[in-house]
Image (cartoon, rainbow, N blue to C red):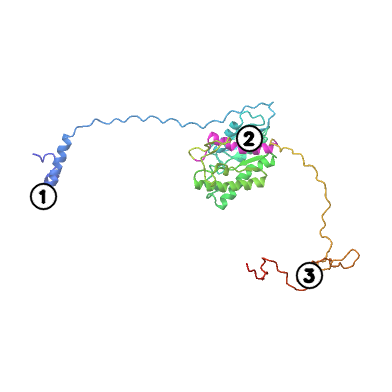
Amino acid sequence: MLAAPFSARAQFFFEQDTPANYWMQERQRQDFFFERSRPQRPPVTRRASKPKPARAAEKAPEPEITDPNDPRPRIVILGDDLGSDLLDGLKTLNPERTTFRLLRRTKDNSGLIRDEGQDWPKITRDLLEAKEAPAMGVILIGMNDRQAIRDGKNSFELRSPRWNELYIARARAIAEVFRDKKIPLVWVGLPIVANEKAAADLNQMNDLFKHVARETGASFVDVWEVFADERGHFAAYGPDVNGQMLRLRTSDGIHFTTAGAKKLAHFVEAEIARLMGDAPKPIAVAPPPPVAKQAPRPTAGPVMPLTAAPTSPGGALLKAQETSLTPEIENTIARGLPLTPKRGRMDDFTWDPR
């Protein structure tokens, strides 16, 4: 019997002869035969997942080669990812530089907001108090600081008044170390980026950096418009240092290509050369020959009456000029006689029978 596969409870329930019970029983019969006719699948064996490759370690800084006999002054480059781009640009701009040496003190993904991994004021202080302190410092930082800042247990949102105060204090702590050591500092402003909201944040941060530079006597290099188009918007392409149109920014709209880093370094190196006294001096031009001095022009001439009658040198009044008139003019003007008519003239009224 077909009722054997079902339980006793199901048999008792389906003994009632109703349409609903019939169709429910038919559905269970179909499910039973379907399960027996379906081929059995082999058990699935899961493959062991391959271990993920280890994350590439951060690029180690280049080893410094110091020569105690090298008299060239050292310039230290501080900052974050963009600071590294600036250093690479300075090296490619003039690879055979003989004026100064470059020292890398950059740290990717660092900033002034959090000091757990990179305490920039302390690093700057230790660097300038070393036995061989650098002759100048260049800093480009802030790209990773678009986040809330903490002051004790309190947190303040980006671009809020308290955020600005705390951020200025941390930037000033770096600049004051250079000022106290009487070492020149070049603070490079943040460049424009592709994201409009991020660009607005960075533009305000540049205002804070300019304020710190004015307070501490540091030089500020503004590169915002250098990488913008004629409308002031972000431009990934632009003229390089040779005037050729090349891609200056990477696809993320933040970092620099080789050509862009070289252009960035071009403007920074001009300020470095000015502070080190290597800026090109103006050409001396011979002064023009002296011009002979003329007598000063009087402010007013002699007073001449315009309505007085002219006089002779002796003081007597001038007489009217004597003229001789022809008889015809004398008769016409003095006596009022008419002119003698001439044949063919309009006043000739004589009758001509011709």
Q: Is residue 254 magenta?
A: yes
Say which amino acid is labelled 1: Pro
Looking at the rendered structure, the secondary structure element under dot 2 is: strand
Question: Residue 115, percent across and down?
Answer: 56, 41
The tag earlier along the polypeptide, 3 or 2, is: 2
Q: Residues within 10 Å of mark 1 (few under 14, many from 20)?
A: few
Name the dominant secondary structure of the magenta segment: helix
Q: Is residue 85 above or below residue 301?
A: above
Q: CA distance from mark 3 to mark 1?
A: 157 Å
Q: Nearer the viewer, mark 2 or mark 1?
A: 2
Residue annotated with mark 1 = 19
Say which amino acid is labelled 3: Glu
Q: Is residue 158 above or below residue 264?
A: below
Say which amino acid is labelled 2: Val
Magenta residues (range): 253-277
Residue 107 visible, this orientation: no
Residue 162 visible, this orientation: yes
Looking at the picture, tell me which residue is in the foreground, 208 or 286: 286
CB under 8 Å between discs 3 and 2: no
Residue annotated with mark 3 = 330
Question: Residue 189, percent across and down?
Answer: 59, 43
Name the mark on residue 159: none
Q: Quadrant of residue 65?
A: top right
Q: Residues within 10 Å of mark 2 (few under 14, many from 20)?
A: many
Quadrant of the snapshot with the C terminus: bottom right
Among all residues in the image, which is located at the extreme front? 353
Q: Nearer the viewer, mark 3 or mark 2?
A: 3
Q: Nearer the viewer, mark 3 or mark 1?
A: 3
Q: CA distance from mark 3 to mark 2?
A: 110 Å
The tag earlier along the polypeptide, 2 or 1, is: 1
Question: Residue 41, percent across and down?
Answer: 23, 31
